[in-house]
Amino acid sequence: MTGGTGAKAGSFSVWLADLTGQEPKVTKVTDTPEIAMINGMATWDENTALVTDCLSGKVYKLDVISGTYNIALEDETMEIPAGAPFQVGINGLKVHRTAEQIHVYYTTTTRYSVYRMPVTHELKPAGPVETLASGVVPDDLVVAHDGTVYVCTNVTNTVARIPPGGGDVVTVAGEAKAMTLAGPTACVLGEGEKVLYVATAGGNATPVDGKTEPAKVVEVRLD
């Protein structure tokens, strides 16, 4: 969980929600004064989270026990390009591990692209960044075991699929002018990877024909 009231350095923080007991417990991990705007988050290991700064174009490594954090990954593809119509660089973030390689997958909204970076077990770049798809307005994403990527497009009200290793973007749910998935902003695969659960923002960033609605979670069948 992240907390903050605006994209001002020092206003964001990271919180831990423990839902393992009978009563939920929420505690602050740390304030993040050096991070301009936290957006995406992913698990690296049991005690480490990765968080994106979508204004400066960086990935931070955060120790959730001590609250210490530092820059882990930087690349031009994470940054907001000159002349961008709005200020969102690296956005969604996921870690995908196979027997051969670890990849950090990420979206960069104002570059209209989805990328992956090979990394070492020490979270160091292990090769060049790969562009998996372009021409989409990506928000959050999730990666299936076989490397298939599902991307929330938020302002275009759809969820799209990218094949393993990259390729053509195919819409699997939603329509640009429909409220079915109004502002899809985050997603997670269900057990067995036959269902995608999508959290929406109700079209608050770009109303659908002038309409917005409360946020919701939508079940998308993939089989």
Image (cartoon, grey):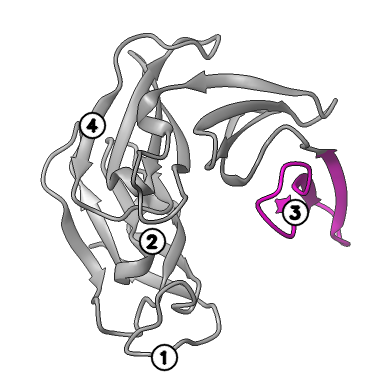
- Is residue 2 found inside the magenta-colored segment of the image? yes
Q: Residue furthest left?
A: 168
Residue 46: image location, x then y, percent: 68, 28
Question: Which residue type does callout 4 highlight?
Answer: Thr
Compared with 134, 188 (above or below) is below
Judging by the rendered image, the residue that carries numbered circle 1 is: 211
Disc sitting over residue 131 in the figure: 4
Inter-mark Cα distance, 4 to 1: 34 Å
Residue nearest the viewer, comparing 19 with 122: 122
Crowdedness of circle 4 by 10 Å Cα count: few (<14), some, many (20+)? some
Disc sitting over residue 11 in the figure: none
Residue 218: image location, x then y, percent: 43, 74
Is 65 left, or right, of 185 in this rendering? right
Question: Quick one: label 4 or label 1, which is nearer the N terminus?
Answer: 4
Which residue appears at 11% of the width and 47% of the height?
168
Which residue appears at 41% of the width and 40% of the height?
80
* Magenta residue span: 1-30
Which residue appears at 86% of the width and 45% of the height?
28
